[in-house]
Image (cartoon, grey):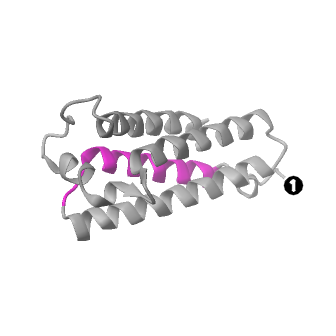
Amino acid sequence: MASAVLSLAGIFIALYLYLHKLGLIGTLACGTGGCETVQSSSYSTVLGVNVPLIGVVGYAAVLVLSVLALARPRDPRWPRLLLWGAVLGTAFTAYLTCIELFVIRAICRWCVGSAVVMVSILIAAWLGRPEADPGAK
């Protein structure tokens, strides 16, 4: 359940950043200016796709996997897929955070919030995996 709620939070963060990228939101509410620097950098797209859009799609996929894991508690495939989705999302987040810190040299508070959400999803998925339940087969 935690991963589903967290993925909704991630969708909202990524959607906010994507709407800004599309020009539908004026200035990002960031307070430091780092968000604008990160969002306007050449690293804000990967293979021609806006990073916030990748976030929206990624968090939506995690939400679907979370719901499937909840709906089918006896089927170990869904929690495992959720865990792998969270691992992939966390690895991508770590890459983006390194780009922010060492290449762009600016920090986006919204991106940090998204990173915290994704790592939290990873922890929830790890704790919810079938192997973590001593009563599970």
Q: In this orientation, which residue lies closer to the viewer: 90 or 126?
A: 90
Which element type, helix, strand or loop, lies under badge 1?
Answer: loop
- Identify the image quadrant of residue 69: top right
7 is higher (above) or lower (below) than 48: above
Is 118 inside the magenta-drawn segment?
A: yes
Residue at numbered disc 1: 137
| Figure quadrant of the C terminus | bottom right
Question: Over which residues does the magenta segment extend?
Answer: 106-127
Image coords of residue 30 (percent x, y): 19, 40
**Residue 26 falls left or right of residue 46:** left
The stretch drawn in magenta includes residue 90: no
Residue 68: quarter of image? top right
- For image coordinates 19% across by 64% down, the residue present is 105
Residue 104 position in % (x across, y down): 22, 64
- Residue 84 rendering spot, x and y as whole percentages: 64, 58
The answer to which of 102 and 76 lies nearer the viewer is 102
